[in-house]
Image (spheres, rainbow, N blue to C red):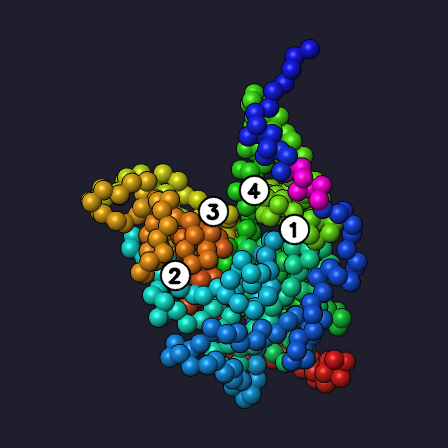
Amino acid sequence: MKTIRIGRGKLAVVSRLVAAVCALTVTPVGANAFGETERGQGGSPCEQYLTQAGVIEGDRTPDGDAITPTTGPDGKSTPVILVHGWTGEAKHTSHRPQDGASRFSMYVDRVADGAGGYTLPDKDVSSSFVGMIEQIPGAVPFMFDYEAVNTHWVSDPHIGRKLAQGIECVTKHYGTKAIVVGHSMGGLATREALAQTGEDGKRIADRVAHVITFGTPNEGSAVLKLGYDAIDTSLWVPGVNIVTGITKLVLRHCAEVTDLTGKDCLGMAGALYSEGARAMEPGSAQLAALPPFPAGVAYTALAGDIQIGGVSLFGFNSKRLVDIGDIAVPHASALAGSTDRMTASCEYAIAAIGSHRHRVSLAQRLEGMRPTHQFTPRVRDHEIASPCFHNNLMSEVGLVTKALGVISEVASRPTSVTDAADKETIDAAL
């Protein structure tokens, strides 16, 4: 009988994976725990669906003053509902995603220009995207939280349907149409929500004035398919196929645990085979069944576009070799179906000679103005330095400015919904 040998390094990796999975208890969470948000301290409206974002420490006006939200024209306010993405968070408590904060809560400090862009100096960094919304007269930001089921597909009633209920509730309260801002899968959750009907039998879409998305995979995420294909291909490679096979089994089990319990299992890698991830694979049946953005609702799509080139020589850049969108979502997928759009573009080269522009580098650059022209990991709490990276889009100055312009325009001319009188009913129930 032939003996199969597994090297110590490979065995150690497999052992750690198996131990991590075995440490998890596969016990379903109670139904009430899925997608339920804690009641806000301020008794904000519709808190069973949405959490009103408060001003957090560190968010200031450009002049360094404290942020004081104000009402809009005629005392009216426009709700702005922020919807996080796959495996994302909804807490607006700090500027650090590592501490469980929302991606919308990161400092806005980046300029998307791979040919010479820099993050802003610390003295010019004043606020998060949420904090900037709070400075717009009449704009009231709310966080939609589906963290407990954030690896599920958007048809889960605790995602699409619950978001629709939140939109209906908050627009009744304020009497004005809402703005919905979605990051990544949050944009797909918005599509699902807008296709719903409210308690009055009317379209939820009729309660929304504008939708804004950051890096939403309207046509799927190619990086997920690449991950699946890479794993499946390596199963045929002698020497690594045993480890890969065990790893695939572990990841599949992790995904089942995460989908069932809402518990984190090996981080994002453990959610690779989750329900939501498989649904976002290009050409999936779930994507095909997802309703398009409804007619009559303005839609602004914001995207990142990273191009990796050949060689940069004394300022000359050879033809780019690879277009990778924002890494997670292809450029065309992020813009599909939009009526208005903007792209943050970043070009990088494999080598730079005689110029410090367009560089791909592994070095960390944390000093000074923190250059973004180097495609490098870890700059101010970001996984990758590029401002065009999927999770950095809400901290890129150009895209944020575009989004704020849309929000400011809508809030300056709030659109009434037909059942504003229901506000008294909502308030009485809270």
Which dot, 1 or 4, sits closer to the camera? 1
The kind of residue on which mark 4 rests is Leu
Tell me if residue 238 comes above or below residue 325 in the rendering.
above
Q: Residue at x 33, y 65 (%)?
A: 121
Q: Is residue 73 left or right of residue 255?
A: left
Q: Quadrant of the N terminus?
A: top right
Tell me if residue 334 comes above or below residue 133 in the rendering.
above
Where residue 31 sits: x, y (%)? 79, 59
Q: Earlier in the sequence, mark 3 or mark 1?
A: 1
Whether residues under marks 4 and 3 lie with C-beta atoms below 8 angstroms apart, the answer is: no
Q: Among all residues in the image, which is located at the extreme front?
A: 8
C-alpha span from label 3 to label 1: 23 Å
Q: Quadrant of residue 156?
A: bottom right
Check residue 421 for magenta coloring. Answer: no
Q: Residue at x 66, y 60 (%)?
A: 146
What range is drawn magenta here?
17-23
C-alpha span from label 1 to label 2: 30 Å
Where residue 63 sits: x, y (%)? 37, 79
Task: Answer whether residue 237 is visible to the viewer in this image.
Answer: yes
* SS label for mark 2: loop
* Residue in front for this viewpoint, 69 or 279: 69
Check residue 19 for magenta coloring. Answer: yes
Q: Which residue is mark 3?
A: 327
The kind of residue on which mark 2 rests is Arg
Q: Residue 224 got which mark?
A: 4
* SS label for mark 1: loop
Q: Earlier in the sequence, mark 4 or mark 3?
A: 4
Q: Which residue is mark 1?
A: 264
Which dot, 3 or 2, sits closer to the camera? 2
Task: Answer whether residue 203 is visible to the viewer in this image.
Answer: no
Q: Which residue is mark 2?
A: 110
